[in-house]
Image (spheres, rainbow, N blue to C red):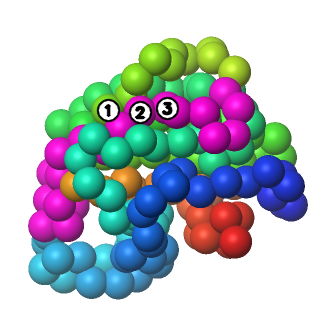
Amino acid sequence: STPPANWLSPSSTGVFGRGFGYNYDSTYEDYRFHSGVDMTLDMGELVFAIADGKVIKVTNDDVWDGRVEIEHDGGLVSVYLGIVPSGIKEGDAIQAGETIGTVGPAPKAEAADGSHLHLEMMLDNEYVDPLEYLR
């Protein structure tokens, strides 16, 4: 699938750290599949939608805290984990660069990494490397 021309970064300040695929997990102290990429951000920093789309899920859970999923054209879904959703609800149309939340406290799933955004991308329900779409 070809990414839209207006893919944006989910933050104006963060940098990508831990990457997609099998790598060392400092929380569980072993090697395991990392289904997304982590962006180093401080708690409270803004998180933006990376492309136009429709909000299909806004939830909270014990493992990741806040979760926002946005469906994009071409079978792509962006998933933002470890955030505090703000001002959005399921069914909302979202524009690239629109604020969807702020970074929350370190999620239990990746507690050793501190506060950060965990960004996943799915294409037809399969995990894909988000950096292939953001570059």
Cα–Cα span, label 1 and label 2: 5 Å
Cα–Cα span, label 1 and label 3: 8 Å
Q: Is residue 83 visible?
A: no
Q: Is residue 68 above or below residue 121?
A: above
Q: Is residue 99 visible?
A: yes
**Magenta stretch containing residue 64, yes or no?**
no
Q: Is residue 26 rendered to the left or right of residue 99? A: left
Question: Residue 135: which quarter of the image?
Answer: bottom right
Q: Residues within 10 Å of mark 3 (few under 14, many from 20)?
A: many
Position of residue 70 measured from the top left corner of the image (x, y, whole percent):
61, 35
Give the mark nearer the N terminus: 1 vs 3.
1
Position of residue 122 measured from the top left corner of the image (x, y, whole percent):
62, 53
Tag 3 secondary structure: strand
Q: Is residue 109 rendered to the left or right of residue 91? A: left
> Could you tell me which residue is drawn at 20 percent across and 67 percent down?
113
Name which residue type carries label 1: Val
Residue extending farthest front: 13
> Could you tell me which residue is drawn at 86 percent across and 61 percent down?
2
> Could you tell me which residue is drawn at 34 percent across and 45 percent down?
45
What span is in magenta? 94-114
Instruction: Quickly name the residue at label 1.
Output: 84
Label 1 close to label 2 by CB (< 8 Å): yes
Name which residue type carries label 2: Gly
Q: Is residue 29 above or below residue 64?
A: below
Name which residue type carries label 3: Ile
Label 3 close to label 2 by CB (< 8 Å): yes
Q: Is residue 38 above or below residue 20?
A: above
